[in-house]
Image (cartoon, grey):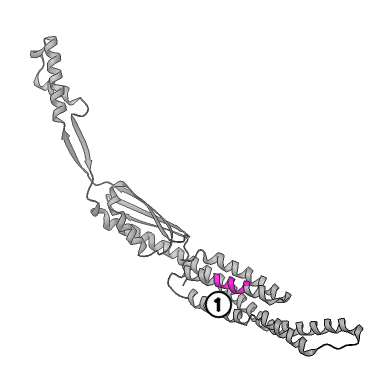
Amino acid sequence: MLKSMTGFGRGEYSGEKLSLTAEIKTVNHRYNEIAIRMPRALNPLEDRVRKQITGVISRGRVDVFINMTDNFVNTYEINVDKDMALSYNNALNEVARVLGLENDISDTQRLSFLLRFTGVINTKETPGDADFYLPFLSEAVDAALDNLMKMRRAEGVNIYNDLLPRIKTLKDKLGEVDERAPAATAEFHVKIRERVAELLKDYAQTADQDKILHEVALFADRTNITEEIVRLGSHIKQFEETVAKDTPVGRKLDFIVQEFNREVNTMASKANDFIITQMTVEMKSEIEKIREQIQNVE
């Protein structure tokens, strides 16, 4: 069954100290374009999340939003800038010497004073290994994809149900054109005979039937749309077979609809018949509605 390219899905993992939410939004796009926004700690996992998504979604613009609340106790890395500490200590000694206070500063006071300077001791939070989060992140993304695909399938059913009557209308109109084509030639035969007879009546002459038949034959050959009718019928059958498949068919359907337009336009230009022209206008209207629908098919 058809799948729409439009949808939204949300999934989450919730534990005692860790919670993750994944939201995936998709819209129609010619190719498969994925944009992922996630916390910096999860950045090393982006490629695996991308592969997880492409395993399910083959076409469309995909926006992924991942949020995380991590209450695990993180470790911290503490670094001492020894050169800076020595420089401050030397400066302190110099000041004490100038003021004559060398013996008035205890080691404890000296240490407390040095620790107040920014940069002597640097603290850096060390995040956990990104792979630790992978199973929890995958669970949230899987749930989001699941909900997303339910929506895309549901919308696909709506598109399918809209396409079926439109294809039937197109087939019915094609049948009417096929039925009308011989009548258009016969009507031309009658019209040309009447016109020639009208022109010759004042001269007491009769029309050359062979020449009239020759003109009718030329008209029939020039306006013959049998080939277009057969091809359009074949394209319609191919469309019906393709739209029932359970694989991504959007691009193929788009190509088939282009062929619909090509055949109908040729019919309209060749037919030289007002009634057939009106029928092709109605057919083109249905084809345009079909084209609009399949723009959102994966």
Q: Provide residue 3's location: percent of width, then percent of height.
A: 46, 67
Please say if 220 is above or below 108.
Answer: below
Looking at the image, residue 30 sits to the left or right of residue 287; the answer is left
Is the stretch drawn in magenta largely helix, strand or loop?
helix
Looking at the image, residue 254 sits to the left or right of residue 122; the answer is right
The magenta stretch spans residue 202: no
* Viewer-closest of 234 and 3: 234
Looking at the image, residue 149 sits to the left or right of residue 123; the answer is right
Circle 1 crowding by C-alpha within 10 Å: few under 14, some 14–19, many from 20: many
| Res 176 seen here | no
* Viewer-closest of 287 and 6: 287
Magenta stretch? 258-265
Q: Provide residue 216's location: percent of width, then percent of height.
A: 73, 84
Residue shown at the point (90%, 84%) measured from the top left? 201
Please say if 253 is above or below 66.
Answer: below
Q: Provide residue 101's location: percent of width, then percent of height.
A: 11, 11
Please say if 234 is above or below 253.
Answer: below
* Viewer-closest of 180 and 5: 180
Q: Provide residue 217's location: percent of width, then percent of height.
A: 71, 85
Residue shown at the point (81%, 88%) measured from the top left? 208
Residue 222 in which image quadrant: bottom right
Residue tagged 1: 236
